[in-house]
Amino acid sequence: MRKMSFLLAMLVISAPHQSQAQEPATSKAFRVDSNASWIRVLAYPDGPLKRFGHHHVISHQSISGTVEVAPNPLESNIILELAVQDFAVDDPALRALEGEEFAGEVPQKDIDGTRANMLGERLLNAEQFPAIQIRSTAMDGSMPDVNIVATVAVIGMEQTVTFPVSIELADDSFTASGQLEITHGELGLSPFTAMGGALSVGDLLVLKYEISGVPASADEK
């Protein structure tokens, strides 16, 4: 009997505690890697005089933000911020990626004029609204291809936009990439027009994006 009691005691001591065996999974905090993340907006001329306009590539390569990846990835949270002044217009290397419609360089005076119009009061109003913020509110789909529903804050107004993305997720990194066709109106904007409307930016925009992240440091969590 004494031998049996000893064996039972040893089994209790050596057995893993239930709390240790069923530790709940935790979220992982990432920060956006600004050096590896980008957004490109393709804009097209419109109006009776559109043949005199240019196809433009508007780009942003200084995106900041955080991503909290939940044990169930569809419950993750994403916050992105884009400084409006960091938008660039018609980088030749990026234009070369977009095919024949974007072939050739745009004169510098046209680039400067396009950027001034984009940042001006009639469009992004960079002086009054210096940042665009994107916050996820829901996700659906099946990994790796999901839809991220987000609130996009532009010029002081919030719009709901659904971003299709393909996600690559690892322990020490993530990448989310995709493409979306969207109108100015869906972003709360109005297309820029000139010459009494004879030349304008087309209402439809094409957004291409890739957001990459690395583990957040302790003071970023």
Image (tube, grey):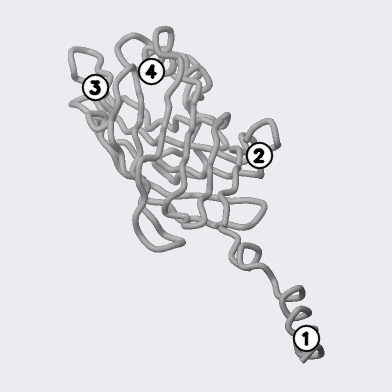
Q: Is residue 184 above or below residue 192?
A: below
Residue to which mark 1 is pinned:
7
Tag 4 or tag 1, which sits nearer the N-term? Answer: 1
Q: Residue at x 46, y 47 (%)?
A: 76
Q: Residue at x 78, y 79 (%)?
A: 10
Circle 4: residue type: Met
Question: Which dot, 3 or 2, sits closer to the camera?
Answer: 2
Question: Which dot, 1 or 3, sits closer to the camera?
Answer: 1
Tag 4 or tag 2, which sits nearer the N-term? Answer: 4
Question: Which dot, 1 or 2, sits closer to the camera?
Answer: 1
Work out whether residue 110 or residue 151 is closer to the camera in this orientation and state it. Answer: 151
Question: Which dot, 2 or 4, sits closer to the camera?
Answer: 2
Circle 3: residue type: Ser
Circle 2: residue type: Ala
Quadrant hosting residue 24: bottom right
User: Does residue 11 appear left or right of residue 161 in this picture?
Assistant: right
Q: Residue at x 36, y 17 (%)?
A: 124
Mark 4, Cα crowd under 10 Å, few <14 / some 14-19 / many 20+, is many
- Helix, strand or loop under label 2: loop
As measured in the structure, the alpha-carbon distance from the residue carrying label 3 to the one carrying label 2 is 37 Å
For the view shown, which residue lies furthest in the front direction?
Answer: 1
Residue to which mark 2 is pinned:
216
Residue to which mark 4 is pinned:
118
As measured in the structure, the alpha-carbon distance from the residue carrying label 1 to the one carrying label 4 is 78 Å
Circle 1: residue type: Leu
User: Does residue 73 appear left or right of residue 122 in this picture?
Assistant: right
Q: Are marks 3 and 2 in contact (CB under 8 Å)?
A: no
The quadrant of the rendering that contains the N terminus is bottom right
